[in-house]
């Protein structure tokens, strides 16, 4: 161990002497390593930025599987069935939707087609009953966005979300109450419970982000600003009263997966579940939409990967060429060392150590340089997620170091394949 | 100490460089190997130093075949090289060159070769040829190897420097008990050796007689008597 340490110390000293005395070569090679490291780090930086953006897109996008009963009322989508489906595919959440149309009593709706004629339908609006309003399609696609209060949760009772415009028009705030009535209307199609009143406390106010164009020709109930989101419990209560049915999701079930990449597999699991026989339930996912949205990023990711591989390859060839040339120049020195009795492996170790020291110097200079550039680019271009983690730096460091070591070894093969006498011949 | 037994070497079988060479070199002696350019003198040094492997025969160090001992180990433990072109590491100082494989104190070795202390920290390229060769010898001495193989050690030096180098080699052999084997073209230089081996058409031959080969060399007396195993004072013309 002492001998080993002593040898290592000698090798290190010799390597350092060589590097400090051969300044020109040291500077050139350090610059090569610096450029290579900056390229690698930048590549990893951009690669991770794309990966993060894709991750965010996935999280924002939310993969969903919509399940709808195929016309047969004998196979309704009950909450139990929905729970079973969610459990089977390991869904991150699910929400069933039941839509019913009731008339508002104590507020006015945003005027539409019926307001000018004064028809009763001018009070009729759509109530979207959902288990978790944050998972409702309009909110996940960002057509609507909660601006005040909170979303509706599974255990809510008598709560509602209304739009900013509707709240403003009627001077409503969080905590105020809205009353809805079951009216005899074709749209409501109520069998019983006519005149039944349901009161909702405003739990949240949402902003309509999706432009709908002129509302004059549109029925009041079709205007997004007029829609109310109500809790599932009250929704089921209304459903039971007016249609005399046990609770079920009349307008389908949506199962959510944070990672859209898992959609295909989840769909297959559902299709293989006997309770969801395809003849009774129709299923579709938004995978195609996700693929469409993420395609440019995936392509950029692939291009970048090829670019990084190419840079590594070209860098390696370039390094091998430079190192071969320089190491070949050092053949007389290697000959002298061999004749002095130094082992080939010791000489190789010294040359590798020299390259490693230069690589480390170049790499340590590259890290702050790349970080600075990433900050500048991030600030100038308002680009998020441009950051290097310690792990990235470590991985890049190891990768470039292996590349350098590999190049140095290849450059030495030509020399080391020679016999000592062939090498020493160059000096005799 | 070190000897060859029926040594044959060639790069191409049809042109043998050395054939059936058996020579013994003893410690405490300075040997000179004479011969025309390309006759195989340096090849013999390479074989003795374990840089080449014999095609036939063997090199024995203290009775052991160096191939069995390991050529790398043989170079590490037994033989030191001194080259005509000095072959110092050009980016190192005098002291650093000597310290490369030093087992003895580099300072002592530098003192032995008479190199002034103020030169020790200088880059070797700033020294004269004679000084550089002394550094090379100091490097070989510092590595404390029993056999010194010198390939034309004075080939690039002027007369004074050549004499100084030769004196160091002689001292190393006679006072420190090393076996110093020197390849040279110079008959005058060879004349100072304890024993001369001359390569002729019939192989290496010991010259312990009037040397006819010197007769055509201007600066050398026509007859020189070299007595085998005699020290400095015993050599007489």
Image (tube, rainbow, N blue to C red):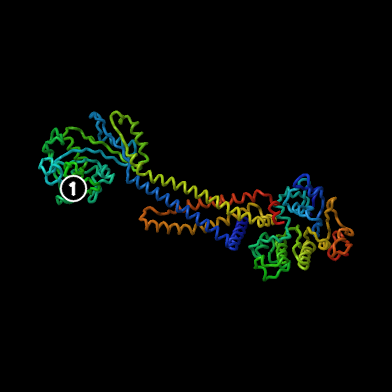
Numbered disc 1: what chain?
A
Left or right of residue A306, residue A125 in this image: left
Compared to residue B190, the image places residue B71 above or below, namely: above
Kindly identify which residue carries mark 1: A202
Where residue B157 sits, quadrant-wise, is bottom right
Instruction: Tell me where residue B69 appears, x and y as whole percent.
Output: 72, 49
Q: Can residue B181 be seen in this view?
A: no
Instruction: Tell me where residue B102 appears, x and y as whole percent.
Output: 68, 61
Residue sitting nearer the eye, A225 or A157: A225
Q: Residues within 10 Å of mark 1 (few under 14, many from 20)?
A: many
Where residue B105 sits, quadrant-wise, is bottom right
Left or right of residue A94, residue A160 in this image: left
Which quadrant: the C terminus of chain A? Answer: bottom right
Instruction: Tell me where residue A34 appears, x and y as whole percent.
Output: 50, 57
Q: What element carries label 1?
A: strand
Q: Residue furthest left?
A: A118
Residue sitting nearer the eye, A339 or A110: A110
Instruction: Tell me where residue B195 appears, x and y as whole percent.
Output: 84, 58
Which quadrant: the N terminus of chain A? Answer: bottom right
Tally the marks. 1
Left or right of residue B204, residue A398 in this image: left
Where residue A73 sits, quadrant-wise, is top left
Compared to residue A226, the image places residue B162 above or below, namely: below
Q: Is residue A100 visible?
A: yes
Residue sitting nearer the eye, B143 or A207: A207
Identified at 43% across, 45% down, the residue is: A302
């Amino acid at each position: 161990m002492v001998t080993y340490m002593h040898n290592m110390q000698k090798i290190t000293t010799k390597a350092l002497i060589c590097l400090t005395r051969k300044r020109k070569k040291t500077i050139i090679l350090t610059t090569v390593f610096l450029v290579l490291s900056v390229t690698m780090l930048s590549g990893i930086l951009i690669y991770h930025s794309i990966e993060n953006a894709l991750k965010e897109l996935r999280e924002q996008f939310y993969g969903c599987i919509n399940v709808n009963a195929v016309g047969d009322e004998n196979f309704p989508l009950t909450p139990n069935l929905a729970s079973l489906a969610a459990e089977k595919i390991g869904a991150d959440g699910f929400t069933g939707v039941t839509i019913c149309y009731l008339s508002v009593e104590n507020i006015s709706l945003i005027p539409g087609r019926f307001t000018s004629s004064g028809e009763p339908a001018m009070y009729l609006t759509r109530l979207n009953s959902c288990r978790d309003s944050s998972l409702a399609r309009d909110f996940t696609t960002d057509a609507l966005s909660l601006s005040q209060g909170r979303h509706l949760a599974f255990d809510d009772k008598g709560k509602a979300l209304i739009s900013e415009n509707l709240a403003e028009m009627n001077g409503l705030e969080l905590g105020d109450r809205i009353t809805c009535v079951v009216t005899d209307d074709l749209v409501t199609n109520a069998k019983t419970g006519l005149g039944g009143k349901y009161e909702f406390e405003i739990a949240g106010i949402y902003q309509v982000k999706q432009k709908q164009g002129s509302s004059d020709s549109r029925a009041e109930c079709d205007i997004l600003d007029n829609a109310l989101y109500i809790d599932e419990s009250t929704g089921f209560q209304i459903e039971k009263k007016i249609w005399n049915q046990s609770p079920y999701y009349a307008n389908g079930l949506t199962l959510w997966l944070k990672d859209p990449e898992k959609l295909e597999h989840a769909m297959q699991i559902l299709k293989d579940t006997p309770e969801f026989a395809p003849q009774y339930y129709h299923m579709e996912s938004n995978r195609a939409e996700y693929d469409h949205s993420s395609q440019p990023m995936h392509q950029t990711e692939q291009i970048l990967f090829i670019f990084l591989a190419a840079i590594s390859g070209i860098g390696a060839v370039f390094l091998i060429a430079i190192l071969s040339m320089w190491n070949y120049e050092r053949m007389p020195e290697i000959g002298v060392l061999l004749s002095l009795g130094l082992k080939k492996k010791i000489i190789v170790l010294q040359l590798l150590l020299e390259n490693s020291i230069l690589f480390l110097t170049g790499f340590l200079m590259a890290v702050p340089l790349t970080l600075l550039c990433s900050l500048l680019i991030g600030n100038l271009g308002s680009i998020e997620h441009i950051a290097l983690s310690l792990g990235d730096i470590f991985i890049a460091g190891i990768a470039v170091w292996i590349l350098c070591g590999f190049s140095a070894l290849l450059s030495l093969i030509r020399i080391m394949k020679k016999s000592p006498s062939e090498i020493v011949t160059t000096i005799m | 100490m070190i000897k060859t037994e029926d040594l044959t070497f060639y790069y191409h079988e049809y042109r043998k460089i050395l054939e059936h060479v058996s020579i013994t070199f003893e410690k405490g002696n300075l040997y000179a190997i004479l011969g025309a350019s390309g006759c195989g003198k340096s090849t013999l040094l390479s074989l003795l130093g374990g840089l080449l492997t014999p095609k036939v025969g063997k090199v024995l160090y203290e009775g052991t075949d160096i191939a069995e001992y390991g050529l790398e180990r043989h170079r590490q433990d037994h033989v030191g090289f001194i080259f005509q072109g000095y072959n110092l590491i050009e980016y190192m100082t005098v002291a650093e060159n000597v310290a490369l494989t030093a087992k003895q104190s580099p300072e002592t070795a530098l003192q032995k070769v008479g190199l002034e202390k103020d030169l020790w920290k200088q880059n070797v390229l700033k020294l004269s040829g004679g000084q550089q060769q002394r550094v090379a010898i100091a490097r070989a001495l510092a590595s404390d190897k029993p056999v010194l193989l010198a390939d034309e050690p004075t080939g690039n030096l002027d007369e004074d420097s050549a004499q100084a180098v030769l004196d160091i080699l002689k001292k190393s052999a006679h006072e420190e008990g090393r076996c110093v084997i020197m390849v040279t073209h110079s008959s005058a230089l060879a004349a100072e050796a304890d024993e001369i081996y001359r390569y002729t058409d019939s192989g290496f031959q010991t010259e312990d007689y009037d040397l006819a080969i010197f007769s055509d060399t201007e600066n050398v007396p026509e007859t020189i008597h070299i007595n085998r195993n005699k020290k400095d004072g015993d050599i007489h013309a």
